[in-house]
Amino acid sequence: MYSMRISNICVFFAVLSLFVSGTGFSQETELSFKQVVGEAFKYNTTVIEAQEEINAQDFNIKASYSDILPSLSFNGGWTRSNNINQAGQTYVNGIQFNTPYSNNTNDNFNLSLRGDITLFNGFSNYDRVKGAKFVRTRLVSLLQKTKQDIVFKLLGDYVTILKDERVVLIDSATLEDSRAQLERVKAFVEIGTKTMTDIYRQDAVVALNELSVEQAKNAYNKSVADLIFDANMNQTRSYTVSGAEFPTEISNESMESYLERVSNTDFLVNTAIKNRYDYKAAAQNLDVLRINYDIADNAVLFPTLSGFSSYDLSGNSFGNISNQRVFSIGLSLSYPIFEGFTLDNQRQQTIISLRIANDDLLQVRSQISVDIKKAVLDLSSLVKQVDISDRSLKSSEADKIAAEEQYKVGLTTLLDVNTAEINYNNALITKSNLVYDFILAQKQLEYLQGLIQY
């Protein structure tokens, strides 16, 4: 009976789809979950901003090489000076001299080429390059974590649509059954075995079922709207979703087998530690802070040794600028003896940041562990709930069949038939929702292990 009911539901939905497609909704676009994820990644602002941060960090990595590579600068200049001395007297060793009036103008042209390089600063220049690369690696991990968060959010939206769609099918099939029952009641009234009261009662049931179908369709349409919004897709178009990626024909044995495979939570936690991008990002943040600590520590412990060379040309005209040439080369050594505790303060700040980051890493690990244990408990409970719902479904199905047969021969009332129909309809919906909850719980466990990829 259950398999026949599901077959009838599928046939009804197929006919309904053909009818709807021929009445103005032929422009609906069917989406697979993979397509939804692709569209979300393409237009999600958080993903775009994270990618731009990575691109910006690529330029920061290039800039970090400036402390390793030599710098080369070229300078040129021209100076004109005008010296005017008025006529007068001057004394040199007590002897008076007369100085004439003078007005001299001199030009000076100069060109200079200079190179500088840091020879040693406690290897902080190399640490800055390494630190910039670590920052990029962390940004990539954060981007991947963002994508996985988006995928799981969309999974919840998508499965909700599938659940609501199945409710529409079940309620629609129940509506058709109640209409058929109304026709049977009318036939009984015509032959005098039932009264008009039963027609009124059954017509009220049909109306309630019509209301349930309309509410289910509204819930379905709103679920589709939520998915389209979260995926940043065009909201002016009509969409349907495909359930091919989430088959619901799952036996209780396969559920129990899956639960047995994931019962070792220690193994799942270790898998998550290897794959979770938020954990990787937290660990990579520690690497960045360790590099920052080394740089701050080196600034206190080691001097800075720099080398330079320059080549200068100068003359009183551009044509004879090479008349005076100077080539210089040298070294400079600097060591901060006291700078008002600035360097030590930087070092202490990095130590504090390291402690906080290490605590954050431990907290992420602890959160992963508890989340996985709770997810396994949810799966275990769902397996039991599905088994209970199967028993309830079989019982309500048998009760419905018995009530319908007894009503035909006058051994029960129409109210009993309708009550049995409602119980059966609720049992179908409960079983369908539990199966989809199990599917989503499986995906959640994959997500918590960092295994969810699209």
Image: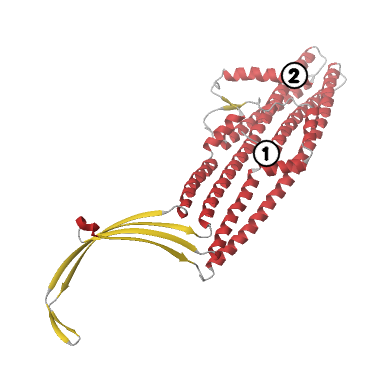
Image quarter (top left, top right, bottom left or bottom right) of the N terminus? top right
> Residue 109: in sight, yes or no?
no
- x, y percentage for residue 26? 55, 21
* First reached walking from the N terminus: tag 1 or tag 2: 2
Residue that label 2 marks = 182
In the rendered image, the residue lying farthest to the top is 191
Q: Which three-letter amino acid code belongs to the residue tagged 2?
A: Leu
**Circle nearer the viewer, 1 or 2:** 1
- x, y percentage for residue 323? 23, 59
- Decide: few, some or many residues near mark 1? Use Cα within 10 Å; few <14, some 14-19, many ≥20: many
Nearer the observer, 112 or 338: 112
Above or below, 299 relative to 426: below
From mark 1 to mark 2, how far is it between C-alphas?
49 Å
Nearer the observer, 107 or 192: 107
Residue that label 1 marks = 447
Contact between labelled residues 2 and 1, with CB atoms less than 8 Å apart:
no
Above or below, 358 relative to 221: below
- x, y percentage for residue 367? 71, 48
> Residue 360: in sight, yes or no?
yes
What residue is rendered at 59% in x and 42% in y? 146
Q: Which three-letter amino acid code belongs to the residue tagged 1?
A: Tyr
